[in-house]
Image (cartoon, helix red, strand yellow):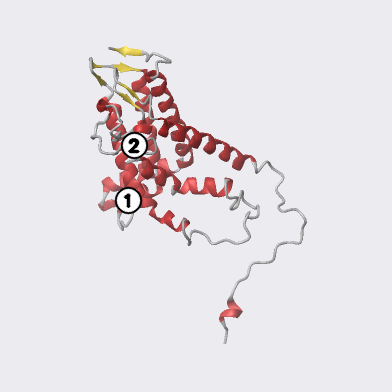
Amino acid sequence: MTTTEDTAVSPPPRAAITPRNLRTDSWMRGPILTVVGITIWVVYATFRVFYQGDYWVPDYHYLTPFYSPCVSEGCIPDSAHFGRFLPDSPLIPYAAVSLPFLLAFRLTCYYYRKAYYRSFWLSPPACAVPDGHAKYTGETRFPLVGQNLHRYFFYAAFLISVINTYDAILAFHSPEGFGFGLGNLVLLANVVLLWCYTFGCHSCRHVMGGRLKHFSKHPIRYRLWTISSALNNRHMMWAWITLASLALTDFYVMSVAAGWIDDLRFVN
């Protein structure tokens, strides 16, 4: 009789070689660039979130996405489209309602997991390169077991994208009436890119086409699933582009609000 031990498959031992790996290409370039890029973005975003200034342009209703929705009692009244109910404190971001969910959505994103696992944790840093840790436990322990909540953070991110879209539309209606400037294009482009990233999320793709036995009986969901799948193929690209668009949009609004530059107006 064949036992379990007889049929078990064990991986072969590692070859007795001195080098840690046999790769001769510049495999460290990817992890290094990822660390540099994410670190720069986190430093800038953290500064802006707690700066609590130059986030609103009253003449054109420009609101930076880093402060949306602005719900602190310290918010300029016209910028608080959904009321002001959080206490005004230098330790509490003006958009404290949305920022934790957006951070959690990005941290648990499938692409970002790969990015910071490989770059910050070296787990592993690249294909065919040994893990930087002696023990591997996967995502079965705290806090990594929380990665399974990604599907729920997606719903929050979807709602916040709706709010960002509302902000971009509202910016076309300044106190002087309908207006259109370079800032509108910046806000609108950022919203479109955010939707490409959000709608291409793996969880969104499953929401659109998951648990269906016959696509032919659900043509609308099938169409949405195909669009989400197409965006999902470039999920890494959208992940990086939206980091850049968020920072650039915030910097543009800050520059106009601080009076460093004037908004280029096309209409009104």
Q: Quadrant of the C terminus?
A: top left
Residue 145 shows which numbered tag? Answer: none
Q: Quadrant of the N terminus?
A: bottom right
List x then y, in percent, for residue 85: 25, 38
- Asked which secondary structure carries label 2, the reply is loop
Residue identifier under label 1:
207
Q: Amino acid at mark 1?
A: Val
The percent coordinates of residue 210 (x first, y second) are 33, 54
Give residue 95's mark: 2
Vertical relation: 6 (above or below) 180? below
Task: Judge depth for marks 1 and 2 and give the one in front.
Answer: 2
Amino acid type of the residue that numbered disc 2 sits on in the rendered structure: Ala
Q: Earlier in the sequence, mark 1 or mark 2?
A: 2
Residue shown at 49%/49% (left/top)? Answer: 113
- Residue that appears at 63% across and 39% down: 29
- Residue at figure coordinates x 46%, y 49% from the top left: 110
What is the quadrant of residue 131 in the picture? bottom right
Element under disc 1: helix
Q: Hey, which quadrant is residue 187 in on the image?
A: top left
Left or right, residue 78 beside residue 96: left
